[in-house]
Amino acid sequence: MKSAKAVWFALAAPLLVLAGMLAIPVFAASGSSGLPPTPIGGIPERALQAYRAAGGWCEGLRWELLAGIGWVESRHGTTGGAAVDPDTGEARPWILGPPLDGRPGVRRLPVGQWLGWWGLPGPWQQAVGPMQFLPATFEAWAVDGDEDGVANPHQIDDAVATAANYLCGGPGGSIPDEREALLRYNRSETYVLEVLAYANSLAGPLSGAGILCPVAGQTSFTDTWLAPRSGGRLHQGVDMFAAYGTPVIAPVAGTAEQSNSALGGLGFRLWGDDGTFYYGSHLSAFGPHWGRVEAGTLLGYVGNTGNARGTPPHLHFEIHPGRSPRDPPAAVNPTPAVSSACEGSQGRHAFLSDD
Ligand SMILES: [Zn+2]
């Protein structure tokens, strides 16, 4: 055992690790920080190198997903004042998660045989290193990423390669569904959203591929992105005109909530599983199902509530890629995405209506 001084880091948010039989190796170090303004530039070079090297470990594993985990777990190995040594690739001082001492929401895992393992001081187990592995999980999936003869959970190449191996279920595995793979890593929906949001922010602007047309019926719209609006505002969305009462559906699966404001009238907020936030407004009425929704779930009906009163009925629709619930708004022009999603698709949505 090496005898480096380790740091513990305090989490601002309650721990999300749930009790159970799963060998969950990680903590969601979620808290006050949002996404970095310049994601790729914000990743320390040594960490970026490790993520890219382990991307493609199996079919379906993109390096951005590893970067998302590294960001949420340890801010790329910088939690608690640590830094990844450019030469050795080791995060120093060693990063240790909070003790798993059985407090509410946290498993109770005595350190047992792992006392002294890569700096574990006892009496409880703690997640270790930039990717926050529990000892048994690391030992079960360990990969010596930098090929120095030692699989070291504090070393960024080893930690990231081991994370890749674990997500893939081994080198011959695959990742058909990123959400499921991430839930295996940490059984927390919030965690999955944060990792995906970060990964998708690295992957570039939203293409619009994969979203359903939010208006399930005949609709017409033009590109009015950043067009002047009342009060000196600029238009942050697309206005999709349709007959009053045309169904409005969830463009992707996620978590939906109602909104109601003077400006938007009746609307929806949708935290997509794809890591993107969607907003729609001016509905005439709400659909019956909120909370967890599938793509195609009925959210409401086209109308002209809010400041659209007196105008032709339309859905005002916004897309905010890579936004997590705590981040400030950053919309992109949704017109290209909506154009590809709605082109030729009017009238053939198999939207899920009431019950
Ligand atoms: Zn609008």
Image (cartoon, helix red, strand yellow):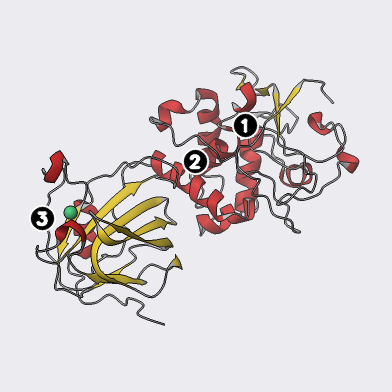
Query: Ligand 1 shows up in which quadrant of the image?
Result: bottom left
Which residue in the protein does label 2 denote?
63
Distance between the Cα atoms at labels 1 and 2? 13 Å
Taking 206 as reference, is 216 above or below it?
below
Closer to the camera, 354 or 171?
354
**Residue reaching furthest to the top:** 87
Answer left or right for 80 relative to 351.
right
* Dot label at residue 72: none
Which mark is first along the chain, 2 or 1?
Answer: 2
Closer to the camera, 86 or 116?
116
Q: Which of marks 3 and 1 is in front?
A: 3
Which residue in the protein does label 3 denote?
222
Distance between the Cα atoms at labels 3 and 1? 48 Å
Which residue in the protein does label 1 denote?
157
Q: Are marks 1 and 2 in contact (CB under 8 Å)?
A: no
Answer left or right for 58 relative to 217.
right
Distance between the Cα atoms at labels 3 and 2? 36 Å
Residue name at image x 20 percent, y 77 percent = 347
